[in-house]
Amino acid sequence: METYEEKIARLREMIAASNNMVFFGGAGVSTESGIPDFRSVDGLYHQQYDYPPETILSHTFYRRNTEEFYRFYKNKMLFLDAEPNAAHKKLAEWEKEGKLKAVITQNIDGLHQAAGNEKVWELHGSVLRNYCEDCKAFYDVNYIKGAEGVPICAKCGGTVKPDVVLYEEGLDDTTLKESVKAIRNADLLIIGGTSLAVYPAAGLIDYFSGKYLVLINKAPTPRDNMADLVIQGSIGEVFSAV
């Protein structure tokens, strides 16, 4: 049985031997910056909201209960004081060195870009981008946060919607295609901080045919048996050790 230190040493060797790395990350990357995974339902939901988060964050709910959607969204999805953590910073470092070719993320917080990564494919969009549904005018996240109730477009009076993919909505076609392309071309794919349970995002792993597949997560995933290396632990700690 390999020790944690031996696994870290092996990961270091894989990174050294690779020049086309891709990182695919989920909520576990952001939780280390203090952003909670909204699936880990806490007492607050039961006290404040009549529906589970998956229902509130659906396209149908957004259309039918826009005000309640925004009450939840502003309280539970916007963490504007969050800072990039060790994992974000290490990925930015690898990109600057030319080793990391793309970050594919299920997160919507913009922390990869804040850390310095430029090639980031955001599968589920970003809270930092918001558009009027009628005239398509752009609004930043502070406009949403500061709006009373439903954010209304200052130009045409339309509803301003976050550029995030809600349940029942499809992923952006270009983002999906570019993510598949990056994974297909990678010689090392590191997957971190995701349970690989949410499709279609989790299915992206099937496009990888490179040399090394590495899974880093605090809990086991359904794809652990496919990986060349599995490290159970904090993504920030693992990347700091590398």
Image (cartoon, rainbow, N blue to C red):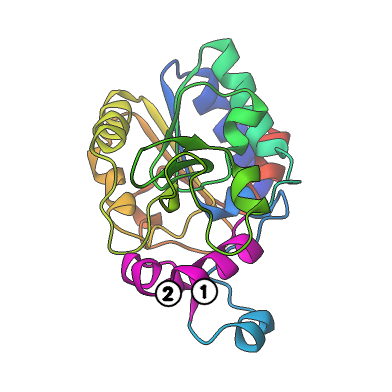
Check disc 1 and give the amino acid type. Glu
Q: Say which mark, if any, is on residue 68.
A: 1
- In terms of secondary structure, where does tag 1 sit? helix
Please give the residue where the numbered disc 2 appears in the rendered image: 65
Amino acid under disc 2: Asn
Could you tell me residue 42's position as x and y percent?
A: 65, 79
10 Å neighbourhood of mark 1: few (<14), some, or many (≥20)?
A: some
Q: Quadrant of residue 8?
A: top right
Residue 133: percent from left, percent from top: 35, 47
For the C terminus, the quadrant is: top right
Quarter containing the N terminus: bottom right
> Which residues make up the magenta segment?
52-78
14 relative to 55 in the view: left or right: right
Q: Report crowding for label 2: few under 14, some 14 to 19, many 20 or more residues within 10 A (C-alpha).
A: few
Predominant secondary structure, magenta span:
helix
Q: Are marks 1 and 2 in contact (CB under 8 Å)?
A: yes
- Asked which quadrant contains residue 168, the reply is bottom left
The residue lying toward the viewer, choosing from 155 and 204, is 155
